[in-house]
Amino acid sequence: MASSSSNNTFYLFPYLPWELRALIWEFAVSPRCIDMYFNHTNYTPIPTSLHACREARNHLTHPTTAYGGGGNRYYEKHHVVLHAPHAKPRPEDVPYIWINWTIDWVEVLLADYL
């Protein structure tokens, strides 16, 4: 008899060959629209595939890993500085985003109060 609660955890994933795990992480990447507001706080969520585990995060943010993979499925960390030229924010206050320049697209918008 089947249990009424479903278990969606695949416990054998760590035992799959590295090449197969790397391909699975790469296929988990999906295109996103990144909205940036001039002179306004930007908030772009971190891609979900980077939240999965350390292995996924390392593979998807470092294209020089042992297995080369698809090559166009990697995220880069970029600091977002869309403030007026006279504003000099402290380095620790400058927000950053993860972006995949191959599949993500960026929309720069003006804040509604300008």
Image (spheres, helix red, strand yellow):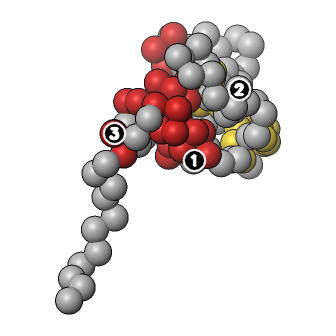
Q: Is residue 76 left or right of residue 58?
A: right
Q: Position of residue 13 (x, y in %)?
A: 36, 46
- Residue type highlighted by circle 3: Pro
Question: In the rendered structure, which disc, 3 or 1, sits on the residue that comes first in sequence?
Answer: 3
Image marks 1 and 2: residues in contact by CB distance under 8 Å: no
Residue 14 is tagged as 3
Q: Secondary structure at mark 2?
A: loop
Q: Secondary structure at mark 3?
A: helix
Residue 9, picture quadrant: bottom left
Question: In the rendered structure, which disc, 3 or 2, sits on the residue that comes first in sequence?
Answer: 3
Residue 28 is tagged as 1
Residue at 70% x, 11% y is 86
Q: Position of residue 39 (x, y in %)?
A: 68, 31
How many C-alpha atoms fall within 10 Å of the one at disc 1: few (<14), some, or many (≥20)?
some
Q: Which residue is mark 2?
A: 71
Give the vertical position of 95 relative to 64 (above or below): below
Residue at 52% x, 39% y is 20
- Residue type highlighted by circle 2: Gly
